[in-house]
């Protein structure tokens, strides 16, 4: 599971295609950072996420053959440029995977781990206001929170 999450998140940045434009680290950063992308990977893994300027990642992942969508959050510095490569620094992995970014059109790209062209994810830009997780529970209002607090601890209301 962790390896699939790492692949999905790290592939945010890279496979070769005749019509694709390979992007360097600075070009990839300008094209990807801060935007919301949905992704689908070669193994059936899907999700959506966003990379922030500090290299942190927030999003969802749904592994093929599993119905549960999981929320994923990676810390600042996870995705960063190392010289001419874009790499993912993930605790617990014995290697630091690096990748290529292939811009497919103005709203999508394909990413693959360097040297493993068969292991790719396709990313499609989505509306930035789209929710990362659907069917999230309703947040309590201030009034309902106060009512709940009084019903749980009547001594607070006295």
Image (cartoon, grey):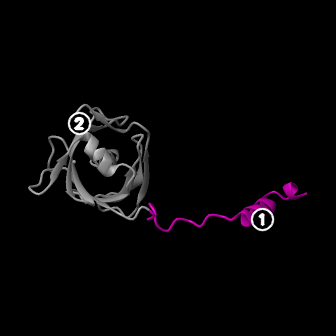
Please give the residue where the numbered disc 1 appears in the rendered image: 147
The picture places residue 64, in percent across and down from the top left corner, at 29, 60
- 24 left or right, relative to 48: left
Residue 39 appears in the picture as rendered? yes
Counting other residues with Cα less than 10 Å from the Cα at mark 2, is it few (<14), some (14-19), or many (20 or more)?
A: some
Mark 1 and mark 2 residues within 8 Å of each other at the beta carbon: no
Q: Residue at x 77, y 59 (%)?
A: 149
Instruction: Tell me the distance, in whole angstroms, between the alpha carbons under discs 1 and 2.
Output: 54 Å
Element type where label 2 sits in the image: strand
The picture places residue 138, in percent across and down from the top left corner, at 59, 67
| 120 vs 66, nearest the viewer | 120
Q: Which quadrant is the C terminus positioned in?
A: bottom right
Q: Which residues are magenta?
A: 129-158
Q: Nearer the viewer, mark 1 or mark 2?
A: 2
Disc sitting over residue 85 in the figure: 2
**Residue 123, magenta (yes or no):** no
Element type where label 1 sits in the image: helix
Q: Is residue 4 above or below residue 129?
A: above
Q: Earlier in the sequence, mark 1 or mark 2?
A: 2
| 135 vs 29, nearest the viewer | 29
The picture places residue 130, in percent across and down from the top left corner, at 43, 65
- 151 left or right, relative to 87: right
């Amino acid at each position: 599971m962790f390896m699939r999450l790492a692949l999905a998140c790290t592939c945010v940045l890279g496979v070769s295609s005749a019509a694709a434009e390979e992007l360097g680290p600075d070009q990839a950063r300008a094209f990807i950072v801060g935007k919301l992308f949905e992704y689908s990977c070669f193994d059936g893994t899907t999700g959506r996420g966003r990379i922030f300027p500090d290299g942190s990642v927030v999003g969802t992942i749904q592994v093929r053959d599993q119905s549960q969508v999981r929320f994923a959050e990676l810390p600042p510095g996870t995705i960063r440029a190392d010289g001419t490569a874009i790499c993912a620094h993930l605790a617990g992995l014995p290697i630091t995977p690096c990748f290529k970014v292939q811009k497919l059109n103005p709203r999508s790209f394909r990413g693959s781990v360097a040297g493993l062209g068969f292991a790719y994810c396709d990313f499609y830009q989505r509306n930035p206001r789209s929710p990362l997780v659907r069917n999230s529970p309703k947040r309590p209002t201030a009034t309902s929170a106060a009512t709940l607090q009084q019903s749980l601890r009547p001594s607070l209301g006295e």
